[in-house]
């Protein structure tokens, strides 16, 4: 599965998660991810990292507002 992230500016990004704990994006970034309680934590290969709170009740096709790992409010959809 993945997350389709849409910024208020209209830009978008899709993050693809692998069960091995790695991720890649459609703009060429990659790194590792972990789940800690209700938080998704990511370490990007460029050295940036952060965590964001996830709603465990969401399923494929649903969207919600959240903050990305950099603190920017976005609309996320499970794909």
Image: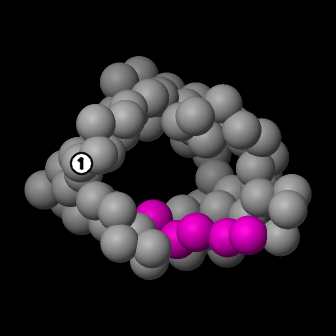
**Whole-percent x and y of residue 10?**
83, 70
> In this rendering, is residue 27 above or below 18?
below
Q: Residues within 10 Å of mark 1 (few under 14, many from 20)?
A: few
The answer to whether 50 appears left or right of 21 in the picture is: right
**Whole-percent x and y of residue 58?**
63, 53
Q: Per the image, is 33 magenta?
A: no
Q: Residue at x 35, y 24 (%)?
A: 36
Residue range of the region highlighted in magenta in the rendering: 11-15
The colouring scheme, among rainbow, by chain, secondary structure or one colour, is: one colour
Query: Circle 1 sits in a helix, a strand or a loop, which is it?
Result: loop
Q: Quadrant of the C terminus?
A: bottom right
Q: Quadrant of the N terminus?
A: bottom left
Is residue 31 or residue 22 the one in the foreground?
31
> In this rendering, is residue 4 above or below 21?
below
Whether residue 77 is visible, yes or no, is no
**Whole-percent x and y of residue 73?**
77, 41
* Residue occupied by mark 1: 45
The answer to whether 51 appears left or right of 63 in the picture is: left
Is residue 24 or residue 2 the one in the foreground?
24
Q: Residue at x 43, y 36 (%)?
A: 40
Q: How many marks?
A: 1
The kind of secondary structure the magenta stretch mainly shows is strand
The residue positioned farthest toward the top in the image shown: 37
Is residue 39 or residue 69 the one in the foreground?
69
Q: Residue at x 54, y 63 (%)?
A: 3
> In this rendering, is residue 35 above or below 12?
above
Whether residue 11 is visible, yes or no, is yes
The residue positioned farthest toward the left in the image shown: 20
């Amino acid at each position: 599965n993945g997350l389709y992230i849409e910024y208020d500016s209209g830009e978008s990004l899709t993050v693809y998660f692998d069960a091995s704990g790695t991720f890649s994006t459609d703009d060429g970034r990659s790194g590792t991810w972990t789940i800690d309680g209700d938080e998704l934590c990511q370490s990007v290969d460029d050295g940036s990292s952060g965590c964001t709170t996830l709603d465990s009740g969401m399923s494929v096709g649903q969207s919600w507002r959240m903050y990305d790992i950099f603190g920017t409010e976005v609309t996320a959809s499970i794909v």
